[in-house]
Amino acid sequence: MASTKITPETSPAQLLQKIQERFRELGLLEKTLTLSHRGHQYLARCDDHAFTVYRLLGHSHLPPGAPGWPVCLVTAESLTDETCPPHDPEDEFSSGLTLQDWLEMIEKRFGGGG
């Protein structure tokens, strides 16, 4: 999703549309993708309503993903990513990745072109 560049001029609705188009091209729309980063597991999904990356907590007696929390969410109305603040790079609750980072990771892993 390197072609899905984020600029300040891009509205959340435009961005979601671009992400949806790329997921559709890759045959990934409405599929749940499993990703790993810094020893943590994440689920990523894009559908007609949103693009979401959800962090899973490990070593829990509950089913996978419960508990967990979204670290990146794009809807037609808003864009939220839970990156690490510059003053605290070791924040254990932050993925440290921006929306652009997640999209590039998905493109690299699932895009077929390497």
Image: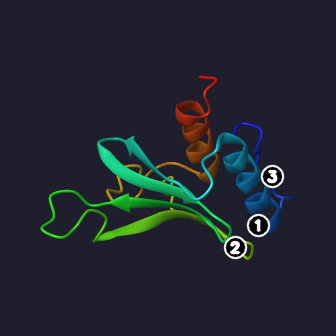
Q: Residue at x 51, y 48 (%)?
A: 97
Q: Is residue 84 visible?
A: no
The image quadrant of residue 16 is bottom right
Q: Is residue 8 visible?
A: yes
Q: From mark 3 to mark 2, how far is it between C-alphas?
A: 14 Å
The secondary element bearing badge 1 is classed as: helix
Residue placed most toward the observer, 36 or 22? 22
Q: From mark 3 to mark 1, how far is it between C-alphas?
A: 10 Å
Residue that mark 2 sits on: 78
User: Which tag, 3 or 2, sits closer to the chain's start?
Assistant: 3
Q: Residue at x 84, y 59 (%)?
A: 10
Residue that mark 1 sits on: 12
Q: Which of the two marks, 3 or 2, is nearer to us in this view?
A: 2
User: Which tag, 2 or 1, sits closer to the chain's start?
Assistant: 1
Q: Are marks 2 and 1 in contact (CB under 8 Å)?
A: yes
Residue placed most toward the observer, 91 or 80? 80
Residue placed most toward the observer, 107 or 85? 107
Left or right, residue 82 beside residue 56: right
Q: Which mark is residue 41?
A: none
Q: How many marks?
A: 3
Left or right, residue 8 beside residue 52: right
Residue type for callout 1: Pro
Task: From this view, report whether residue 107 is shown above or below residue 8.
Answer: above
Q: Residue at x 61, y 52 (%)?
A: 99
Residue type for callout 3: Thr
Residue most toward the front?
27
Q: Which mark is residue 7?
A: 3
